[in-house]
Amino acid sequence: MLEDRTLAGLSPTPWPAAYPKGYAVVDVETTGLARDDRIISAAVYRLDARGEVEDHWYTLVNPERDPGPVWIHGLTSDALEGAPLFADIAEEFAVRLADRVLVAHNAVFDWQMIAREYARAQREAPVRQRLCTIALAKELDLPLPNHKLESLAAHFGVVQQRAHHALDDARVLAEAFRPSLRAAAAGGMRLPLLECRPLTEWSDRPVPRQQSGGNSGYRAGSWRPSRKRPACPYPNPGRYEDGKRLKQGMRVAFSGDTSTDRELLEDRATEAGLHVATSLSRLTSLLVTNDPDSGTSKVVKARQYGTPVVDEAAFGQLLRDLEPAESR
């Protein structure tokens, strides 16, 4: 078992009663990073309340389309040909996730890919909370050169054998999560848990399945297809003021992890008549973030410019009572 270096020399401390009873450490490999990409393999390590491994599970998934960046995950169309469809493994996957906190490295990505697959299968993933190990590493102030999985693994002395293989990535993350969890418990730290809301909105565009079998024709530049939004038809009325209503034409920026798919949030804002900004400037009316204490460039600029900040839940309430733009 991995030596818990973080707690070396510390006397035992009571385990926080408010901590979750169990965790599902998850990794999924996908055909790409966009909203219409698909899962091609998935792995789950189930851990008990103290981070000890109970069991693990792994499966390939046939995406019924081009497998994407084969040079990264190594899974060709031929390798996935006889694999089950997601609908075929949805029940077993759900059993592994049920009543546990989903733990992943960049958890918003894994959660959104899983939630979309369950939505396509007309089901709901049994996940109510997630924990991102990047956010946990930041809370613990670990001395990492960056927040890649390999850096977290190296910090805790975990040897990675097959990077970008779902089962090995999940194993590595489970081994690195255990000492992180114990360090948080020893310090009485509140875990950075986020709510996972069931996905009811999603979209797909047909993607031709690769026929050649060997090398994928998926271009690296096609991972994030550009989505040009229509120009906001209303002038910017200025800054949002606390206690007042959002007004059509206001410039809204988003930063950090969100419970709802980021693109869906942006779509809702656009449809409501807001201007969705990709960066933050002095003209930005409002920043939406669930982590106002983070050091992202948008949060830093918001502090510098005095830009109002609200969390995702508050933004959702504001969207329900939007003030129409003044008629010209």
Image (cartoon, grey):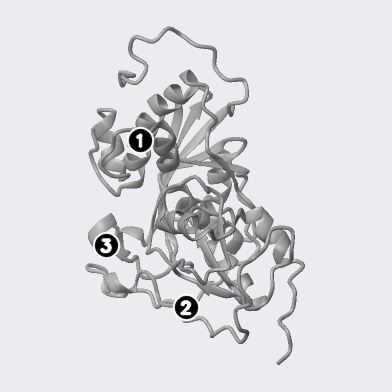
| Pointer 1 or 3: first along the chain | 3
Measured as percent of width and height from the top left, residue 318 is found at: 71, 63
**Nearer the observer, 214 or 221:** 221
Seen as rendered, the residue at the extreme right is 321
Where disc 2 sits, the SS reads: loop
Q: For the residue carrying disc 1, how many other residues have a C-alpha within 10 Å: few (<14), some (14-19), or many (20+)?
A: many
Residues at marks 2 and 3 touching, judged by CB atoms closer than 8 Å: no
Q: Quadrant of residue 236?
A: bottom right
Residue receiving disc 2: 206
The amino acid on which the numbered mark 2 sits, given as a three-letter code, is Pro
Residue 229 - label: none
Instruction: Name which residue lies at 29% across and 73% down.
Output: 221
Label 3 secondary element: helix
Residue bearing the label numbered 3 = 70
Q: Horizontally, is 3 left or right of 123 in the view?
A: left
Residue located beneath label 1 in the image: 171
